[in-house]
Image: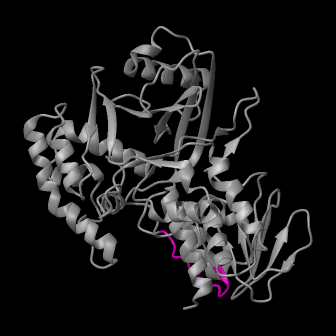
Amino acid sequence: MNADAFVIGAGVAGLAAAVRLAQHDRRVVVFEARGTSGGRATSFDDRQGGPPLDNGQHALMGCYHETLAFLAAIGSRDLVRVQPALSVSVVDTSGARSTLSCPSWPSPFQMLAGVARWEAVPLAERVQLLRMAPALWRARQVVATGRGDLPARDDETVRQWLTRHGQGARLTALLWEPLAVAALNQGIDAASARPFVRVLGQVFGPGRDDASIALVTRPLIDVVGRPAERFLSARGSRVVCHALARVELDGSQAVRIVLRDAAPVELHGRPVIVAVPWHALPQVMAGDTTRVGPVLAAAAATRPVSIVSVNLWFDRQVLDVPMLGIEGRSFQWAFAREGYVSLVMSGADAIVRERSDTITALALADLRHAVPAARAQAPTRTMAIREPRATFSLRADQPARPDTATAVANLLLASDWVETGLPATIEGAAVAGRRAAEHILSPR
């Protein structure tokens, strides 16, 4: 097969790696087992004839610089709307709505100013945010320079870290906990503080919109998968879907890619990037896997965390803001989509295996608590979407994540599980993909 490099897996990491290589005139073939590219950031056809439906709501942030650069490269950056400054509405446990609205000031002053006038939080707790300023500044410097250590201990949870920095219960419930759960897909009593502090270092970066929310304006397949495929095709590369692939190792080298419905591809030293989720790695690597044995053992020991989304269609619009945080309920966020509302529950292990009608009833109850306009209407249609292995656990007791390079000369890893310092986000996947490509372009 005429190519300079191969990628197994057409999620964000795999596509980002392929696009980076193609930008440097390398011909790449990407093998994808499923029928569409994009991985967990994709869409599926609506059987009732509407526009494609995303496999879950994916909110970005202005600090997702690698993701936005990737989208700019493939020509879909204009399909992402970034707030000029952070503004997010939250409904508390009593049903009262408030909005954290920050001015377009340099970081971290925009957050300090926004919280200072956020009357939903007691004045004493607003003042306590100042105690976070040194840690936020330190995290920002570590992220920006790549030097130094994050201001968080290895053995502390997010809640312990917030408590150590004097953050009160109300501010934690309305600001820090929703941000942490959205970023980490895990509760603040379980997730390790270090990846959260790494995220904060990005969120409070130097860009005026680094802390802003960014939402896609089209189905994800039109934002990620299809434009990436067009970009690659125009440069002599391609994505091959319905191509279940394994890489066969002989110990020190990856020697061939074995395909289910086609002849094997002999590598002859050409590099292959394995860009599949951590839990799929043992199925993708075959032959003498001794040198990647520790990676496969870590993958097998890494616990998954679930996400559940519920789409609710109504006769008329019920949600008057693009996204709404919901404090103290099962579903943490509601998003206004074209024709429907999408509710998201991160860390959904407790209900991911429940019946669809049970999950839907729970989502509807949470929406009606938060949005009065939904109380007088019954949904005309519902859909529950389960992702039992949406992300990997960030508990401190989980195995160490692997590096991009492996002990096999021409085998590289690229997924959000690769150690980037980031949690399992689109940004983490984009960073991992770019790093894998850079290993090929500039061999160490």
Write down the quadrant of residue 77 in the picture. bottom right
Taking 95 as reference, is 31 left or right?
Answer: right
- Taking the spot 33% from the left edge, 53% from the top edge, the residue there is 211
Residue 188 drawn at (x, y percent): 32, 47
Residue 247 drawn at (x, y percent): 75, 74
Of helix, strand and loop, which mostly describes the magenta segment?
loop
- Taking the spot 25% from the left edge, 64% from the top edge, the residue there is 152
Q: Is residue 103 above or below residue 230?
A: above
Q: Magenta includes 195?
A: no
Taking 306 as reference, is 269 left or right?
Answer: right
Write down the quadrant of residue 149 in the picture. bottom left
Q: Is residue 370 above or below residue 260?
A: above
Any part of residue 95 in sight: yes
Taking 134 as reference, is 235 left or right?
Answer: right
Residue 53 drawn at (x, y percent): 66, 37
Q: Nearer the viewer, residue 132 or 53?
A: 53
Residue 281 drawn at (x, y percent): 65, 65
Q: Which residues are magenta?
A: 401-411
Q: Nearer the viewer, residue 210 or 81?
A: 81
Q: Nearer the viewer, residue 309 or 144?
A: 144
**Quarter that holds the N terminus:** bottom right
Q: Is residue 400 above or below residue 316?
A: below
Any part of residue 416 in sight: no
